[in-house]
Image (cartoon, grey):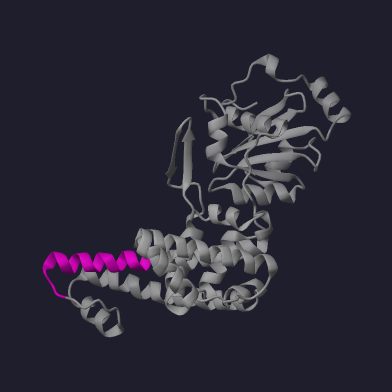
Amino acid sequence: MGKKDIVKKDDIMRKDDIMKSVFLDPANLYVGIDLHKKYYTGTIMNSAGKIVCRDNFPPTLRGAGTFFNFVPPSTKMAIEACSLWRGAYKLLIKLGYHVVLAHPAKTRAISGTKKTDPVDSRDLADLLRVGYLPQVYIPDEDMYILKCAARHKADLVRIRQMLQCKIKSYLDREGIFYKNSWSKENLAILRSLHPHVAHYVEGVETMNRLIKDSLKEIRALAHNTYLAGILQTAPGIAEFSSLMILGEVSDVKRFETRKNLVSYGGLCPGIYQSGDKCYPVKNRACNTWLKWIMYVCSRRATRMDTKYTKHYERVKKRKGKKVAKRSTARKMLEDVWCMLTYEHPYIP
């Protein structure tokens, strides 16, 4: 047992009881793992809710194999969706275990107020045992590659925008008039103003090169992805946006109706109802990447297709620009659901 593992003697099974539990019913073991950079805290629980074993182990293949030496490969294991989950998922999959990803916010709401590493791992194992564990979808490797490529390009663009804002801030501070252009000629002029500005200009030029390399990767992925080609038949959706949508939606079959996908994208209002009171609230439990890219695509679509243009203008007259933008993005996401579900090109 680890030093940080505070457990009562009555809560841990004896060695003889462990072997009986394993040999009599090896499939009815449930494991919860609390993830950290330097170590993992694991709790092994049987079907009766009794803790079989609980300890810290290193996040390596050898360390996990030693800790789970008597656990059969078919055992279910629960980990929380955090920044470290992907590495732990690959590690446990190599050992042949069935890994379930838990929603951290919902898990914390169900569990108690006491929070330590052993308690967190125990709660994960217990929720997995009783079937109350709030799960998060794990995409397959192909969709994960598309998601990473699209998000990487978006991150590079945001970093470039941040550097450009730093340059604009300096020019405004010094009272220098400038054109909102980032051509090679203007960057050369900016470089000569001040050494600090020259550093930002070098960063912008570096990001330009990286964005070009990322676009080459995205074009290759989009060319070799069948569903990306289908999405590109819709107005306003190009190579990058098609990969972003595919990566965030992943398997469209997990959304039974188009309304489920719209809710996942955060393009419908939430609702709060208690007694006689009922009013809409902002839907925060959504995929922000999907929501952002649908807003971008819908703005283009309103200039390219009369179907979306008429819808936007009709809603705008009644409820204003803000609601019209969201309504157009919602309508477009519904069309995306139809295209991915039936694998059919866009129909105007």
- Locate the N terminus and report the quarter of the image it occupies: top right
Task: Kindly tell me whether residue 5 is visible in this rendering.
Answer: yes
Residue 161 placement (x, y as % from top left): 34, 67
Check the image and report above or below for 311 versus 131: below
Q: Is residue 209 left or right of residue 18?
A: left
Residue 11 placement (x, y as % from top left): 69, 18
Q: Residue at x 77, y 39 (%)?
A: 75
How many marks overall? Answer: 0
Residue in front for this viewpoint, 148 or 265: 265
Q: Residue at x 69, y 14 (%)?
A: 10
**Residue 172, magenta (yes or no):** yes
Residue in front for this viewpoint, 230 or 21: 230
Q: Is residue 173 left or right of residue 344?
A: left
Most common SS among magenta residues = helix
**Residue 129, magenta (yes or no):** no
Q: Residue furthest left?
A: 175
Check the image and report above or below for 4 versus 171: above
Q: Residue at x 66, y 49 (%)?
A: 89
Q: Residue furthest bottom?
A: 185
Residue 336 placement (x, y as % from top left): 58, 66
Residue 279 placement (x, y as % from top left): 43, 41
Q: Residue furthest top?
A: 10
Q: Residue at x 71, y 27 (%)?
A: 53
Quarter residue 244 falls in: bottom right
Task: Kindly tell me whether residue 246 is visible in this rendering.
Answer: no
- Bounds of the magenta segment: 159-177
Check the image and report above or below for 59 versus 251: above
Q: Is residue 276 left or right of residue 52?
A: left
- Locate the C terminus and report the quarter of the image it occupies: bottom right
